[in-house]
Each structure stands twice: as C-alpha cells, then as structure tokens.
Image (cartoon, rainbow, N blue to C red):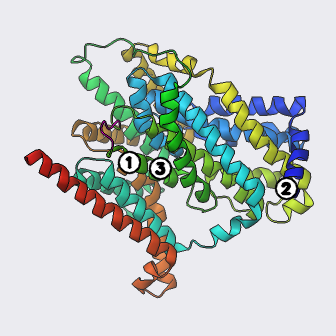
Amino acid sequence: MESLSLLMEGFSQALTPMNLLWVFVGAFLGTAVGVLPGLGSSMAVALLLPVTFSLDPVGAFIMFAGVYFGGLFGDSTMGILMNTPGGATAIATTFEGHRMAKTGRAPQALATSAIGAFIGGLIATTLVVFFAPKLADIAVMFGPAEYFALAVFAFIATASVVSDSVIKGLSALVIGLALAVVGIDGISGASRFTADMPQLFDGISIIVITVGVLALGEVLHVASRIHRDPKLSAIAVSGRPFLSKREFREALPAWLRGTAFGVPFGVIPVGGAEVPTFMAYGTERQLDRKRRNPQFGKGAIRGVAAPEAAGNATSGTAMGALLALGLPTSATAAIMLAAFQQYGLQPGPLLFERNADLVWALLASLFVGLVMLLVLNLPFAPLWAKLLLIPKPYLYAGITVFCGLGVYATSAATSDLLIVLAIGALGFVLRRYGFPLAPIMIGVVLGPLAETSLRNAMMSSGGEIAVLVHSPVTWTLYGILALVLVYTAWRRIVSRARVDV
C-alpha cells in the first residue's frame, strides 16, 4: 500500500497541465523521429536529450517517458507500412505487420500495434511499481552460460519454425551469424571477414543490415516484378482505425503471451527487446500451425500483437531495472542513464530514498505516457496508413531515398551506403528463392551476445565445457528447446505422411 500512496503522489505531479504538455510533446516527437528509417527509439532519445537540459528534472524525465514509448511506436509504424523498422525491436512485428498492410489492413495493424504497446507497457509498469526492489533477484540468475543458452534457444527455435524448410531456415541463420562476426575480434584483436578494408573493422551496423535486408531488399524485389504485376497503383487501405470484436478476441491472447515474454527480459542485460519479440513471434507462429486455417504468411494479427506487447513490456521493466538497480539493459536505457547523470542523479536502490519525488513522478508519467500514446496514435492510424496510397513507383523510390538518408545520418560514411546496397542485393536474392528473413535478423542481433557469452563462460571455467549446462536455467532452456525440436520434427513427419496418402 505504501507503493500505491507514493504512486498517487507521483500522479499529482505528472498530471499538472505543464507536465501533461511535456508528455504530449515527448510522445509526438518520439513517434516522429521513430518513423524515420535507420533512426528509431534510441536515436529519438539521443536526439532529444539536449532539448531537456533547460527543463527541471521532473519535467525533463516526464518528457522522456513520452519520447521513450513514442519512439517504440514509431519504430513499428514504419515497419508495418514500409517494411522498414525504425529499430531492431520492431523487426519481428514487421513480418506479419507489413503483410497486413499489403492486404489493405494497415490501420488495423497499426491499431493492433498501439493497443499491444499499451497493454504490454501497462502491465510491465504496474509490476515495476510494486516489485522494483525484487528485480535484482531475476538479474542475478543469468550469467554467461545462461545468456549463451538463451541465444541458442532463440537461434534454433526461430530457424526451425519460421520456414517450411529447415535447411533454408538454418542457412538464413548462418548468413545472419556471418554478418554479425565481421570486424575486429574484441578479445584476440584479429580481423575477421573484413578483406583488410578499414571500413569494416568496426563491423557492420545493425541499422545497415536491417535497412538493407528488410527495406532495400523489398524495394529490389518489387522493382523486379513491377512489369509483371498489374496492380502498379497504390495499395488499397481500409479506413477502419479500430479492431472488430473478432479481431480483438484474436489478438488478446497474443498480447498477454507477448507481455509474459517481455516482462522478465527487461531486467536481463541482453541488449534490448529483440529476444522476447522474436520468441513471442515464434511462439505465435508455432501455435498458428495447429489451427485449421493458418494465418501466418498472409498477415496474421497475432504476429503483430505478440511482438509489440513483448517489446513494450520489456521497455517497461527495463525502466524499473534502471531505476532500482542502475542497470541499463538496452541502448535506450543507457542513454536515459546518461540523462540521469547529467542532472547529478545516480539510479540505484538509494535513488528511491534520496529522490523519491522524482522517481514516483517518473513512474506515474510512464502510465500517462502510455495513455497519451494510445490517444495520440490510435486515431491517426488511418492517416499513417494513407502513405500506402502513394503509387508504388513513387512510394518505393521514396523509401530508397529515406533508406540512404537514414544510413548516412547514423555514421556519415559513404562506405555504409555501398554496404547497404550489397546487403540489399542479398536480401533480394533471399526473397527470390524463398529464404526466411527472421533467422537472419536474429542471428545478427544475438550473434555477438552468443559469442561473447560462450567465450566468457569458457574462460571463467578454464575451458570446461560442462559450465554451459551447470545451472537450472540452462537445463530449462535446453529442455524446452529439445521439446520444440522433437515436436517440430514430429509435425513435419505427420504432415508429409498425410500428403503421401
């Protein structure tokens, strides 16, 4: 009850007219920056950080709450409409979200995204309010061996369920891992797959790979078929900015399952919300296979609902981990930590004692920011969707320009423009021959985590391989993975037997 009374005091600060204005400005600007290809939510927080220096700490962090969630929604908006996610957390949403947009259901996809963001963030933030001091208990359960098991679980589970061909799924995963290891090895200092090109010594940016594989590869694919496709005009858009009762019932279980995936990952420093979003996506795809009329690949609403809820639930508990532990578990949280330090504040257990007014006002503003995001973006879903009314030649030409601008803006290196062209060509070839894109992206995102965790675990144990399976967490993850693989193999055997009959 003490937490509840403190939260009410926080609402009394957050709900003043001026602070409501800052939440609105933050949500609007965060969304506006998030929709730009290659920038995303973390870039939105970074770009808007100097704007807050003239504000008092409470007003600044309340504005950041709006930027925080607004940027996440902006990431997903461009992923759904243009197949160009603003950040890695929106990649899983893009697969089914863009298919919904191509079938004229862009407003419904955006509404599913907005409601999922609200539900995931609301549940996660509520848990943070009441259980922030206990977050450390979850974090200490994960060491290098557990992170490696988690990465392997995500690799194999995703590659085996997102494609009808296991060989194509695993091949796509290998491509993603190969892209992830380009650059200078941080431990040995060896140059890997760089062809002695200095431009590749720092590796290939996740932004360059995401834009190349998902956006530019789609542009080239559309361009290759444009003379065969009679529908060269705009994509049809249904103007309904809300979900029907049937669609809501369809999405609700996925929202809740996605939230369950996302909540614990906000405390685990694995680099962001990519892991739970892909796990939520893979789970929904696996469940979809059991249905009489599978929807994945056609624009499944659950393929949007689950990753969105997972991503925002992770962001909600990540804020709790930052406040309670001083532990930044994502790039955005790391930038927020810098903002705290700019005001002479150090997140951690003592923050709740020394700056209770600021902490509880910020937690209250997270709730206000979620509501503001829903109110701001749900009615605007049809407006965002009207981008698809632009004729395809102009639309995809514009996407190409923004891809180039987004990539160049992050590094100011012309070499990145050449690299994104090469990766775009690779993305086109993969689409042409039916390779899934999800394993590539999860290999790129989690490859460095898997490599670092494996090497740290082996070095700490003196090369003893048993360290990889020494804890209950690793047993659980590998056990679930084994069950998933056995079930997947059994299902494929049964389906082939039915075809033969």
Residue 457 lies in magenta, yes or no? no
Residue at image location 24% in from the left, 50% down from the top: 168
Above/below status of 194 relative to 61:
below
Label 3 to label 2, Cα distance in Å?
31 Å
Q: Which residues are magenta?
A: 291-295
Left or right: where does residue 271 sit relative to residue 348? Answer: left
Residue at image location 69% in from the left, 26% down from the top: 375
Left or right: where does residue 422 sit relative to residue 42? Answer: left
Instruction: Report helix, strand or loop for mark 1.
Output: helix
Q: Residue at label 1?
A: 287
Quick one: 324 or 296, which is closer to the camera?
A: 296
Instruction: Report helix, strand or loop for mark 2.
Output: helix
Label 2 to label 1, Cα distance in Å?
38 Å
Camera-near label (3 vs 2) is 2
Instruction: Report helix, strand or loop for mark 3.
Output: helix
Q: Residue at label 2?
A: 3
Camera-near label (3 vs 1) is 1
The earlier-in-sequence mark between 2 and 1 is 2
Q: Residue at label 3?
A: 280
Q: Pointer 1: residues within 10 angstroms few (<14), some, or many (20+)?
A: few
Instruction: Tell me the amino acid under the disc marked 1.
Output: Leu
Q: In the rendered image, is residue 462 in sight?
A: yes
The earlier-in-sequence mark between 3 and 1 is 3
Instruction: Tell me the amino acid under the disc marked 3.
Output: Ala
Judged from this view, the residue extending furthest toward the left is: 501
